[in-house]
Amino acid sequence: MAKRITIEDVAKEAGVSKGTVSAVLNGKNTVKPRTRERILEVMKDLNFRPRGMARNLKNGSEDRSIGLIIKDINYPFYTAIATGVREYAYSKGYQVIITSSENDHECEKKFTHLFSTKDIKGAIIAPIVEGATEIEHLFKLKMINYPFVLLEEVRGIQANAVVIDNLRAVRQAVKYLIDAGHRKIVHFAGPLQSSHTQERIEGFRYAFSETTLAFNKDMVVFIGSRYEDSYRNSLEFFRNKPRDQYPTAIVCFNDQQALAVMTALKEVNIRVPDEMSIIGNDDIYYAQLYPVPLTTIHAPLHEIGVRSAEILIRNIESPVLLPPERILLQTDLVVRESTRSILV
Amino acid sequence: MAKRITIEDVAKEAGVSKGTVSAVLNGKNTVKPRTRERILEVMKDLNFRPRGMARNLKNGSEDRSIGLIIKDINYPFYTAIATGVREYAYSKGYQVIITSSENDHECEKKFTHLFSTKDIKGAIIAPIVEGATEIEHLFKLKMINYPFVLLEEVRGIQANAVVIDNLRAVRQAVKYLIDAGHRKIVHFAGPLQSSHTQERIEGFRYAFSETTLAFNKDMVVFIGSRYEDSYRNSLEFFRNKPRDQYPTAIVCFNDQQALAVMTALKEVNIRVPDEMSIIGNDDIYYAQLYPVPLTTIHAPLHEIGVRSAEILIRNIESPVLLPPERILLQTDLVVRESTRSILV
DNA sequence: CGGGATAATTGAAACGGTTTGATTTTTATT
DNA sequence: AATAAAAATCAAACCGTTTCAATTATCCCG
């Protein structure tokens, strides 16, 4: 176990004091060129890497930075939120660093720990809320009064949150389909680690309760949200079902899933929207560019980012502990070409 | 200027010693419930937030993490690289944190500083190489033997780099167009802060030098790479030119730009590929989903991530300073539907 | 060549936690 | 109530840097 090299080792080797080495490190011009060269040389030889934390300990870390924990770095939903966060944070003099848990709960835990120990001043977290909800890591953050904002509801914890009104969103989408004459509608639900999944199912169900149409649980099918999963599962769904039992419309969990479903539909020769209407969710940037531009539920992604950054920074800068805030944001249905009316 | 609250303040207020407060903070079960409650209470009252760095100083930071500085969090090119980085890093027990400079050089500088002072063990950097190339911040990293890998060539510095063979890539694309009968070909070049821009222009030019066709500098037009810029500038390009002087094919700087260009073409009623062939660059995931699936140059994004993480971690873990490595990766032209032959 | 001015270097204190062995307090036992 | 054992707490040392007042080296000039 090679002991780590410190400024002291360098000093000794170069025959100077710690203070002088420190001066070189900080680009002070008080040190004689000859000495400077020698010290630089020794630093290279020993492969000396100064520990910035020791510096920060002394000076009180001069930087201001916040962290963001998202679930999927490749899903534009999250990067759009990140942009909102960044813009606001930047305007307040904060840097933002992004991490992606890739839907791994362990990862999320590690990141919260990382942030709090690296003097990242606060965090915005898209939490994984699986089953019995392991949330001790969030409690730990609360214990040390670490400021954070959640992007999904987590039961059992009082914390800042900026969330979307999923129930109302999906309810509105279903209503739109029903108004357009659809009677056989299915909801392709998402992954269980997301609170969005449950809320969107609720919304779907709720929409039926407002009509005379009956809801039954076969109308909700869990196919995941990752492209490959959704593709495979939806294809299976279509293949296992006689054609005359197909729904006429599908409400998808999100836009990525919707894309996979449309690809699967192509595979089984069902045309969108002529034979099947598809509604997505989120309105990621690329949804409008899909081969069939997607009708979807527009979420105010940028605003989610801005609002959560706002709350976070307010909390960071407050000398006293602030009570938790909760903000509920509304969505809009944006109609493109993947849905059509089947009224005669 | 409110003095920061320290563990000592808490200890004093609660009438215990620092050690006891520390024990509570670390969830040790050696502290009596009553005392624990009291301390917790005081921590809340004072809004005490422990500095993790002081902890790490004593224990030597237990975590292993690397940083990634990309230029645009919303461009899938970078998130695909990030995925490669993550996968490799994760397999080696490293966490990765991502930051985006959003093409702001100041930002990049700040992030390199942030990483090195927060004990992030090393960095992978997509550098902004504007004009006279401000690179003192990279030199500073070298001075402190901070391990890093560049994703673009930076002149004037010896450093690890994993780069794409842009010249060969574009040359191949142009050759493909010429073989398909195109004679009037234009290159829409990208932003000047990217070394890719220059290299791709070189490749474009080089392709002509291999034929009897003449190259002249009007064949390269700078329209930027951000969607809005590219859209506006390309539209202007088309509007200012009589129709019979249009090229028959355009080699775009990247896929995002290509999308903007295709949108502009729609605006002026030029059909792709019938009246205009378009070639992109990068092969981001969504390129295949564009309204007209894009012919583009496939870059091994995932591999870029993996290889650079590999080099970085090797450097981090080496006790001695390693000589810089440079890896040049090749691309492939993938032909979809945005190009066609105009041979009779 | 001496002496003051200036440049370069030193060394100890400080930063805010954790750790540890010693000490005090509490609990259990007789 | 006395004592042994166990539990809780304490005080000091420690981590690796920066800072700054004090010291030493160097320079300049008459």
Image: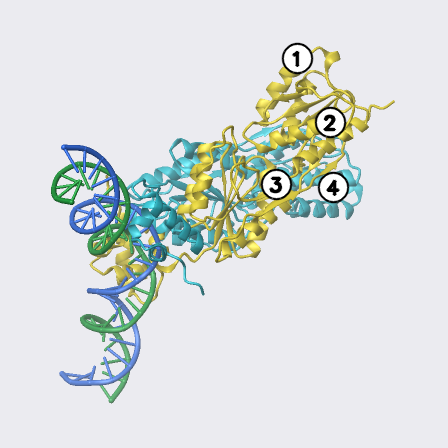
Chain colours: A cyan, B yellow, C green, D blue
Q: Quadrant of the N terminus of chain B?
A: top left
Mark 1 vs mark 3, CA separation in Å:
36 Å
Mark 4, Cα crowd under 10 Å, few <14 / some 14-19 / many 20+, is many
Mark 2, Cα crowd under 10 Å, few <14 / some 14-19 / many 20+, is few
Chain letter of mark 4 equals A
Q: Is residue A291 left or right of residue A139?
A: right
Front of the two marks 3 and 2: 2
Q: Is residue A182 visible?
A: no
Foreground pick, B9 / B125: B125
| Residue A340: image location, x then y, percent | 70, 28
Mark 3 vs mark 4, CA separation in Å:
36 Å
Q: Are marks 3 and 4 in contact (CB under 8 Å)?
A: no
Q: Quadrant of the C terminus of chain B?
A: top right
Chain letter of mark 2 equals B
Residue labelled with disc 3: B163
Q: Which mark is residue B209?
A: 2
| Residue B274: image location, x then y, percent | 79, 22
Q: Amino acid at mark 3?
A: Val
